[in-house]
Image (cartoon, coloured by chain):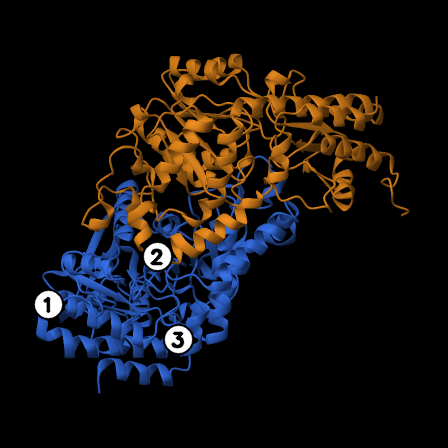
Chain colours: A blue, B orange
Amino acid sequence: MTVSARAAELDAADPLVGMRSRFVLDSDVVAYLDGNSLGRPLRVTAEALAAFTAHDWGTRLIRSWDEQWVDLPEALGDRLGALLLGAGPGQTLVGDSTSVLIYKLARAAVDAAEPARVEIVVSDDDFPTDRYLLEGIAAETGRTLRWIPTDPAGGVSPEQVAAAVGPRTALVVLSHVAYRSGFLADAAAITRLVHDAGALVCWDLCHSVGSVPVALDAWGADLAVGCTYKYLGGGPGSPAFAYVASRHQGVLRQPVQGWFGRADPFAMAAGYVPAPGLRQFLSGTPPVLATVPLRVGLDLYAEAGIEAVRAKSEALTAFAVEIADEVLAPLGVTLASPRDPARRGGHVTLRHPRAREVVEELWRRGVIPDFRAPDGVRIGLAPLSTSFTEVAAGLVEVGSALVGTSPPGTTA
Amino acid sequence: MTVSARAAELDAADPLVGMRSRFVLDSDVVAYLDGNSLGRPLRVTAEALAAFTAHDWGTRLIRSWDEQWVDLPEALGDRLGALLLGAGPGQTLVGDSTSVLIYKLARAAVDAAEPARVEIVVSDDDFPTDRYLLEGIAAETGRTLRWIPTDPAGGVSPEQVAAAVGPRTALVVLSHVAYRSGFLADAAAITRLVHDAGALVCWDLCHSVGSVPVALDAWGADLAVGCTYKYLGGGPGSPAFAYVASRHQGVLRQPVQGWFGRADPFAMAAGYVPAPGLRQFLSGTPPVLATVPLRVGLDLYAEAGIEAVRAKSEALTAFAVEIADEVLAPLGVTLASPRDPARRGGHVTLRHPRAREVVEELWRRGVIPDFRAPDGVRIGLAPLSTSFTEVAAGLVEVGSALVGTSPPGTTA
């Protein structure tokens, strides 16, 4: 059976197949394989923005602060936490950017650590902003970084964490799904190991939220951050989220102590008094308008359910690996992601020495994966908006670009 | 002549009168007097959001980062700087919240100050988030705060600044227009005095940008921040802006060192290397979608011109003061703003012991000013969306609410 025939069969059997038509789909795009960098908008997103602008903003005006917006960071966080993070209420907020939230949470954790805990542990292949921010925090707080080397599978194993943590550890920051390889960390086991060493762990969920079930409360996680513009459809640069376990609230204290993190902010009184609970982790006026696309994105997740999303995500990446083995391996392409679907998130990365020029050619052909230096073609498969047919079309085109043939239907 | 007849005359003579119909206007709102807290949306804003969602986001997808978004924080900052801040190119960026940007700029300035400069100078009636953030920065950097008491006119005079600054001063943070009284500071004179003391000044422009001409370069300002959801129409919680004078770039360094502030961020290389110029002040992925309303807001300012906006703003506040003197003073209302239009920004605050309940009653009647504890009714007059008729209707209703009569046309 041809690749495209198999794709058609898989699409026909996909219980989530109807979800794809809810998204804005442009006919010029043959295959969008970067939904884990920027998710497609939903078709209702523009309507939701228009309704928000006309009513919540344009008609209710400043009254909307009292009516709904003051509590939005936590209300939306609670919804996100319940649907996708395994987080009980009062522990998740939406706001700022991932980078700003990593800074706030990591500073809070490091500032609260005993002086003997001089090390911040991080993977040497973690997403750049995590590494850069922690370098800065280490420098300003007199700590040092301890780097865990990425293991051959593209991630960090519990054994590596066990070897890295100890009485000198203040904080461990790791990605649940590695941004490059898609490696899925054993978050429950690693969290236990970090706690055994008396340290705290902050999970970066940017590449897992919305594709992989997350169970922050069950893991016993301390802190977590993530973004909403990948699988969740929040739009470019949409606000991020942070999780602070209840037991750390009122103990940890973040340094960007703006008015929204103060008790009774509208009293505008003298002196900063930390707000009780999670709200101390807020700083400025919350980004209300910018959360509208996320709100409709969460509606879709409520309808689909994360378990079904994960099942489709595994099937999508398995199909991509199958095509890579069959069509692309003979052209010199290797897999830079775990082969076991249970050990990877929603994307796979393929390696080829000519990856950079191949991605440039693919973009010209309307096939849009991401290039990851030095030699990676990252294939991001958003479970709700990607069809198996799209995966097949895109990966066959990778082969076509590699052998230098023209895409079907052109005469160039 | 009655108040409403005078209002009609003023509207007829207003060269900007046509601008008001560009905004979303709801017939249930009799008078919106809080445009300096949250500006009304423009009617084109919803269309601009829809076009952005369909095209820049939905069709160009991740390619828009290369095509336009990577440089958006500075490109939009340059436009804002040229139109409204008197700032030459390469000194203004858009992103984060005002609170986060105050933290970044103030930390950068204090971290770079000589150790003997142990004081951060701030007004005791400055907007709460400024005060709270600086308290935190003082605590974490071993500095102390020096408070300037608000003068009887509701602001801070050059003489007060001269008395507060000296060889112990690291940084002075002040509002250009006071959030409560509307007092307009003499920014040029104060900047000179701060520089004479060897310190830096950071101007909070939240209440001046878009209502009062700002001349950061001409003042010789060092740093500035402001928000875009008041006069500029950015929408609730829209991104803020920061100005860092060219001479401080590459010298001052902010602590939230995320990937967008690194040189060559997409190399995703090891080690944080500050980006050259202004970009070191970026942290996370920029809030692209959230800048769409601001972009159309700036289009309107380009059309109107800030000098015409300021002229109308002065006329609006003068008319409000005139009605207050004539109609409200006999009811016990006093003015808590400067009487000289040249010494105030785009809002005035009226005082009355029953201000809180009066504002509650006004909101029920569709007249929407802001309450400012303990006894202030703040009247914000957005020059492009407020008519003189609206000012008259709103202030007459203040009187009506004070004497407890029903509004005209009701039988309650």
Task: Locate residue A82, reporting x and y percent.
Answer: 49, 69
User: Which mark, residue A309?
Assistant: 3
The amino acid type of the residue labelled 3 equals Val
A13 relative to A213, above or below: below
Residue at mark 2: chain: B
Q: Amino acid at mark 2?
A: Leu
Query: Gap between marks 1 and 2, in whole Å?
Result: 26 Å
Q: Are marks 1 and 2 on the same chain?
A: no
Q: Residue at x 24, y 60 (%)?
A: A166
Tags 2 and 3 both on a single chain: no
Q: CB under 8 Å between callouts 1 and 2?
A: no
Q: Residue at x 47, y 38 (%)?
A: B98
Q: Earlier in the sequence, mark 3 or mark 1?
A: 3
Compare residues A236 and B329 and report the one nearer the observer: A236
Q: Can you identify the residue that label 1 sits on?
A: A403
Most distant residue in the bottom direction: A1
Secondary structure state at the residue bearing disc 3: helix
Q: Label 1: how many residues lie within 10 Å, few (<14), some (14-19) or many (20+)?
A: few
Quadrant of the drawing holding the N terminus of chain B = top right
Which chain is mark 1 on?
A
In front of the other: B117 or A370: A370
Q: Of helix, strand and loop, which one carries label 2?
A: loop
According to the image, label 2 marks what residue?
Answer: B61
Contact (CB < 8 A) between labels 3 and 1? no
Callout 1 amino acid: Val
Q: Is residue B278 above or below residue A145?
A: above
